[in-house]
């Protein structure tokens, strides 16, 4: 692309391969971008809320994903348009930062784009619209601070945390046993949380799934589950007060790094070589026995001979355990990962009260449970379910619940869900619009209308009359000055979200509004789209 001037000194652009590029300018570019953003938001609109629908996405290699999670839906979709990709990034950033509210943030951005389109048709400049939206988002975020409630929880009183996690899980497939799953998630987070620093390391929570059983069989294990079994079928299946040697060196004779050839021309030489190998294995097993270990967990495989020797010496062993699992086992048992047999010492052994092998159903599937660990800071959530898709979706739902519990430990402020917070912000933003003398007041008013789109989508998905329901709740909020009135999606018979125990985290809600506004501002500021031709 190059800049040139005509005979009157006016600049114009020369674009290489002009005929093969398409170019949109001015309002057309903005309209096209807005249409792309709205199209993505429309897909997710029906997935919002407890009565939201699920989406089934088939990947190119035939894998099927059934999910309600906004970030997963958009990630699995093959999106070509650049603006639509921005919406995908939007839900991803909400997922990384907050973990919950990935659908709502895209629906919110779609509603803002819809309002911006109407303002553009009225002839308002896109920059003024963007500035108005920015002012309105600041008003909304401040208002959320005012209507937020702090609630206290402790290790003995986890009910408030459970209630908030239940709100998150109510919009997922797993909502029929949301109570038990919410309790599992909260207990897992509190087990690994550092309450003094208000920090939670979610890497210490391992989520493992196994097809079979019922969703209700999902349990929290204060320890680690490894999807492996003992290396020899005759090794003991239950070890109490285990001392675990965690090794990253293989039970094999050492191999030279260079290429080598061994010439064996007599039986004696072969015997000597075999004896030497046997001696290596003997020494390795003996070293493990000498330091007092009663279980060996190894990252690599064993020779059959090593396996046989371990069996004879009464030293149970597990092989081919992944690196991440080894680290978690080391954290949980307080052991050290040992890279060479020479470095094994009794201090480096991990300790666990019970190691047992458990088999499932009629299949030969077996898993290893390492429980009652010295350091219970690593836990496992073990999910059961009817099929693979249910388990995958439950993993995603549990991840959302874990993130919500983590956010509450970081900042224990909550706002009320069911669209109550959005309606309250909408009323506050509408009131603030009249105080603004400039053209921005149109944009601020439009922002208030866009905030109403979330409760409207909730009502629509619940099979209620959207406009009637929204206006009734809004007038009730203003009349009673009560920011806790929301949409009664589950038909409980009350609009008060305090009675229904529908909570959301304050930081999650604020992040939604800020992220959606930023993306919409970015889209509005684009006035020229130059795209290559389709070959």
Image (spheres, helix red, strand yellow):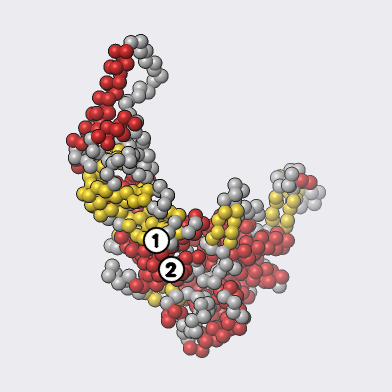
**Which type of secondary structure does the marked residue at label 2 adopt?**
helix
- Where residue 523 sits: x, y (%)? 62, 60
Could one spot residue 262 in this view of the protein?
yes
Left or right: where 40 falls relative to 178: right
- Where residue 356 sits: x, y (%)? 29, 50
Q: Residue under circle 1?
A: 218
Label 1: how many Cα within 10 Å (few below 14, some 14–19, many 20+): many
- In this view, the residue in front, 289 or 72, is 289
Left or right: where 443 falls relative to 504: right
| Residue at position x 37%, y 12% in the image | 263
- Where residue 112 sits: x, y (%)? 60, 69
Image marks 1 and 2: residues in contact by CB distance under 8 Å: yes
Left or right: where 338 falls relative to 104: left
The extreme right residue here reads 7
Q: Residue under circle 2?
A: 177
Work out whether mark 1 precedes mark 2 in sequence or the reverse, and give the earlier one.
2
């Amino acid at each position: 692309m190059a800049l040139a001037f005509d005979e009157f000194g006016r600049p114009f652009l020369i674009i290489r391969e002009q005929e093969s590029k398409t170019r949109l300018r001015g309002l057309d570019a903005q309209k096209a971008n807005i249409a792309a953003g709205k199209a993505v938001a429309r897909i997710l609109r029906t997935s919002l809320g407890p009565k939201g629908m699920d989406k089934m996405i088939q990947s190119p290699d035939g894998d099927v994903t059934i999910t309600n999670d906004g970030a997963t839906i958009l990630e699995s979709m093959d999106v070509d348009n650049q603006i639509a990709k921005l919406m995908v990034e939007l839900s991803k950033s909400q997922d990384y930062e907050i973990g919950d509210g990935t659908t709502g943030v895209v629906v919110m951005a779609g509603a803002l784009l819809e309002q911006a389109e109407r303002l553009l048709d009225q002839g308002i400049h896109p920059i003024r619209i963007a500035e108005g939206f920015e002012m309105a988002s600041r008003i909304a975020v401040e208002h959320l601070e005012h209507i937020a409630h702090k609630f206290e929880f402790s290790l003995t009183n986890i009910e408030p945390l459970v209630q908030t996690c239940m709100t998150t899980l109510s919009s997922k497939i797993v909502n029929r046993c949301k109570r038990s799953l919410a309790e599992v998630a909260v207990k897992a987070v509190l087990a690994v949380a550092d309450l003094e620093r208000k920090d939670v390391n979610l890497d210490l929570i391992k989520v493992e799934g196994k097809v079979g059983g019922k969703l209700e069989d999902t349990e929290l294990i204060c320890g680690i589950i490894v999807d492996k079994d003992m290396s020899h079928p005759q090794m003991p299946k239950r070890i109490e007060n285990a001392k675990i040697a965690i090794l990253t060196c293989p039970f094999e004779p050492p191999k030279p790094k260079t290429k080598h050839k061994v010439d064996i021309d007599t039986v004696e030489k072969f015997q000597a070589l075999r004896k030497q190998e046997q001696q290596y294995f003997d020494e390795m097993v003996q070293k493990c026995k000498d330091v007092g270990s009663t279980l060996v967990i190894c990252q690599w495989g064993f020779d059959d001979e090593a396996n046989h020797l371990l069996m004879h010496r009464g030293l149970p062993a597990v092989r081919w355990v992944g690196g991440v699992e080894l680290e978690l086992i080391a954290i949980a048992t307080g052991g050290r990962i040992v890279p060479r047999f020479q470095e094994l010492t009794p201090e480096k052994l991990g300790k666990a009260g019970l190691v047992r092998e458990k088999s499932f159903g009629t299949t030969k599937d077996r898993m290893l449970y390492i429980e009652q660990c010295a350091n219970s800071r690593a836990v496992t959530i073990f999910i059961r379910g009817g099929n693979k898709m249910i388990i995958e979706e439950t993993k995603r739902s549990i991840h959302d619940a874990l993130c919500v519990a983590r956010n509450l430990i970081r900042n224990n402020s909550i706002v009320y869900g069911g669209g109550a917070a959005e309606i309250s912000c909408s009323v506050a933003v509408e009131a603030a619009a009249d105080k603004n003398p400039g053209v921005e007041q149109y944009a601020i008013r439009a922002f208030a209308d866009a905030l109403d789109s979330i409760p409207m989508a909730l009502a629509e998905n619940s099979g209620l009359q959207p406009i009637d329901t929204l206006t009734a709740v809004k007038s009730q909020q203003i009349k009673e000055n009560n920011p806790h009135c929301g949409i009664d999606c589950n038909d409980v018979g009350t609009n008060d979200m305090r009675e229904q125990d529908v909570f959301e985290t304050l930081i999650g809600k604020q992040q939604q509004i800020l992220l959606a506004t930023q993306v919409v501002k970015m889209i509005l500021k684009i006035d020229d789209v130059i795209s290559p031709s389709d070959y």
